Image (cartoon, rainbow, N blue to C red):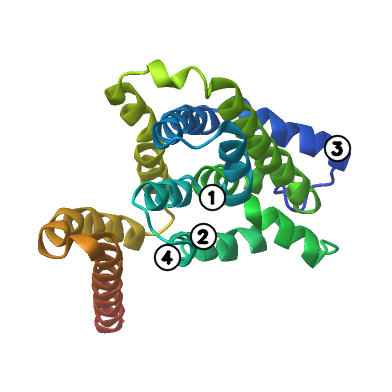
Amino acid sequence: MTAETAPDHHSQTHWFLVGMRGLFSLPAIILMLSFVGFCALTVEAGIPVEQVVFMVGAVWALPAKVILVGSMMGGANLLAAFVAVTLSSVRMMPMVAALVPEIRGRRTPTWLLLALSHCVAITAWVYAMERVVNVPRERRVAFFAGFGVTLVLANMLLVGVTYRYVATFPPIVAGCLFFLTPVYFLASIWNSARHPVVHIAMVFGLAGGPLFYWLVPKFDILLAGLVGGTLAWAVERTLRVRRAQNAEVKA
């Protein structure tokens, strides 16, 4: 009997609190340390603390906020900043598409899923995808809401509290804190991948990043993802066809 089919005697509130406890997990702690590094960036940019706190809650995804702050520091106009942040956030759509079927129950309202999709970013997605399989189907939305909403509010509070102190951090410390999240994300995706094509895509993408940065620095990340993913799909399809042909020969 799995968690999805086993009877559950705990309330929605219980599973919401279980999700809240995820704030003390390694992924959440790493993300919070990264937000301290981001806070140092906003101090350098001269953005007032109240605007930084609002930015954390409204934009949420850390890379998108970095793009927004970079656009502001570079003097980009509002439309250019809007387009850049929007294109950065499009990458969340596949994450939402993968997570929603895992947490949706028979009576889950669509508006609730749409509201919780705001909390979907690297950390919340990895954490939820690894753990919701152990949560009863009808309690998964409560579990994810407990983790996602708490994570957003905790980082808003953290940025507000640490804003006045991070100005004293050496730049190397702030930079290291900021890059903890992408490093953890790569390690988590590699470890939790359910299909070899994910490993292949990551290898191609990581190898292509420096190459495309040298060739076309303005489109390096986009091309590394597009070319790496396409090559991974082609390799996986070729291997699948060969396995099918070998199976037919043996039969």
Identify residue for label 3: 13
Q: Earlier in the sequence, mark 1 or mark 4?
A: 4
Above or below, 27 relative to 135: above
> From mark 4 to mark 3, how far is it between C-alphas?
42 Å
Q: What element carries label 4?
A: helix
* Residue at the image position 43 percent from the left and 48 percent from the top: 63
Taking depth in this image into account, of 52 and 156 the one nearest to the observer is 52
Q: How crowded is mark 1: few (under 14 residues within 10 Å), some or many (20 or more)?
A: many
* Residue at the image position 78 percent from the left and 58 percent from the top: 112
In this view, the mark in front (4 or 3): 4
Q: Tag 4: residue type?
A: Ala
Identify residue for label 4: 80
Q: Which of marks 2 and 4 is nearer the N terminus?
A: 4
Q: Tag 1: residue type?
A: Ala
> From mark 2 to mark 1, how far is it between C-alphas?
7 Å
* Residue at the image position 62 percent from the left and 35 percent from the top: 50
Above or below, 162 relative to 186: above
What label does residue 121 carry, if any? Answer: 1
Q: Are marks 2 and 1 in contact (CB under 8 Å)?
A: yes
Q: Which of marks 4 and 3 is nearer the N terminus?
A: 3
Identify residue for label 2: 92
Q: How many marks?
A: 4
Where residue 178 sits: x, y (%)?
Answer: 38, 33
- Left or right: residue 229 versus residue 63 is left
